[in-house]
Image (cartoon, rainbow, N blue to C red):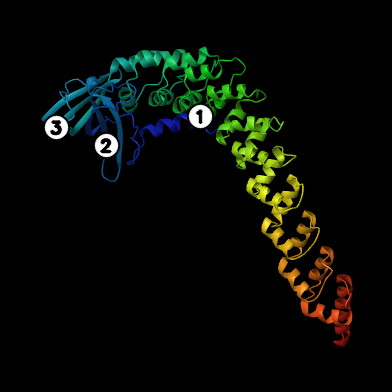
Amino acid sequence: MLKSGLALAAAAFLVSPYGPFPMTANDVPNGRWEGDLRDRDCGERGDARGLCLQLTLKQGTRLHRSSWSMPIPVAEFTGLGATTRTYSSESVHFELKRDAGTLSFEGDFDRGEGGGEFIFSGDPDFVSAVKRMRLSEPTQRELLVLALHAVSQRQLAAYKERGYLRGDFDEVITFAVHGVTPEFIDEIRALGYDRPSSDDLVSMQIHGVTAEYIRDLTRDGKRRPSIDQLVSMRIHGVDRDLSRKLAEHHLEDYDDDDLVSLKIHGVNLDLIGALEALGDRPDVDELVALSVQGVTPDYVERMVRTGLEDLDVDALISLKVQGVDPDYVRRMVASGLGDLDADDLIAARVQGVDPEFVRDMVRAGIPDLDLEDLIGARVQGLDAGFVREMVDAGLRDLDLDGLIGLKIHGVDGDFVRRVLRSMPRADPDEIVDQWTHRGRRDRRYRGT
């Protein structure tokens, strides 16, 4: 599974259509702010019933601009008097105070839309606490990011205790962006995943692999998926219900990758019951193969009702691939060809032998047709039109092999008439001999 690195994820957090924030150590973070008051969508920390400010910070010039945006509950600001989304004020001063520092805002609001200037000041006590943890001293830009995500001293210490801070802030910034809390780490470890990597934890949060999801999947105690498998299973919608349905069908020989494969290919588990009616118990690979080729439970049941024998997984897949549907089977059987099996019908379909072709050949007057003969005729290009041409020329011996011989050698009706005038009882083999003799004579005449 492809994983994003921590540095890349941290950078992605600051990237906008305007580019990333510069991260120089001596720069004081300041610039312009814009805000849009909303009634909801404040993220996991917000109260859906409370007022929210969609805050955007911008820095730089038109050519080199940086931008960052996130929703923050209005209740977390000090001095912001907005109580409705239509709040207006010609002059506002408010702050966002966090452990890592304070953002100060000046500006105005007009019917819920605000803007102005901001400046950030890092908190010296927070910097001192970081140094006591033997972490590198954070830049003002890093402090700004930590403040915006409300990362506290206590939270940093919790990450450190769990072994996830190794001298810089890439990990903690990425954790903050994606909601990897110390509590989440503890929940995952309690489930037996003792040392999940930072990338693993971020990937789990991005894709919604919660402790509850893991417990639900592993409730039967039969398996313990790896974190990569858990993420893949979550992405593809594998849940406890899938395992339960497999158990109902008494299918137990599968692993976690098989569960993902079943979901990826949209396997309808009713296929199991449909195949059991044939005395066949499919495994996961066979179920996937059937689904990939479009074999549905309805298709299986309709094929069974045709009375076709020797149906199994391989036969059903081959029949479906070659376009043999139940209607084709019924019409072929009704054409008078006798007992047919799956291989017969597949061969017929591949060579274009359909009920109409069979009917036309019967009407042309060929007796005792079987499917093998018809396939041979079709392969050699023999059709009812050619048969009628031979009949019109006076040929009475309508043996299919003989007609195929005439077709292969390119004998036409006019030549047959000429031969029959001198040899009224000539059969197809004799006519072919005459045709071949004529060809040898013509070649001698041409000196070839």
- Gap between marks 3 and 1, in whole Å? 46 Å
Pointer 3 or 2: first along the chain = 2
Q: Earlier in the sequence, mark 2 or mark 1?
A: 2
Residue 237 got which mark?
Answer: 1
Q: Which residue is mark 2?
A: 59
In the image, 13 versus 189, the foreground residue is 189
Mark 3 near mark 2, Cβ–Cβ under 8 Å?
no
Looking at the picture, tell me which residue is in the foreground, 249 or 189.
Answer: 249
Q: Is residue 126 visible?
A: yes
Between marks 3 and 2 in the image, the one whose residue lies nearer the viewer: 3
Residue 40 rendering spot, x and y as whole percentages? 27, 27
Residue type highlighted by circle 2: Gln
Q: Amino acid at mark 1?
A: Gly
Q: CA distance from mark 3 to mark 2?
A: 18 Å
The secondary structure type at the circle numbered 3 is strand
Which residue occupies 67% across, 51% down?
331
Residue under label 3, please give it: 108
The image quarter in which residue 283 lies: top right
List x then y, in percent, for residue 5: 48, 31
Q: Secondary structure at mark 1?
A: loop
Residue at the spot 51% in from the left edge and 12% down from the top edge:
190
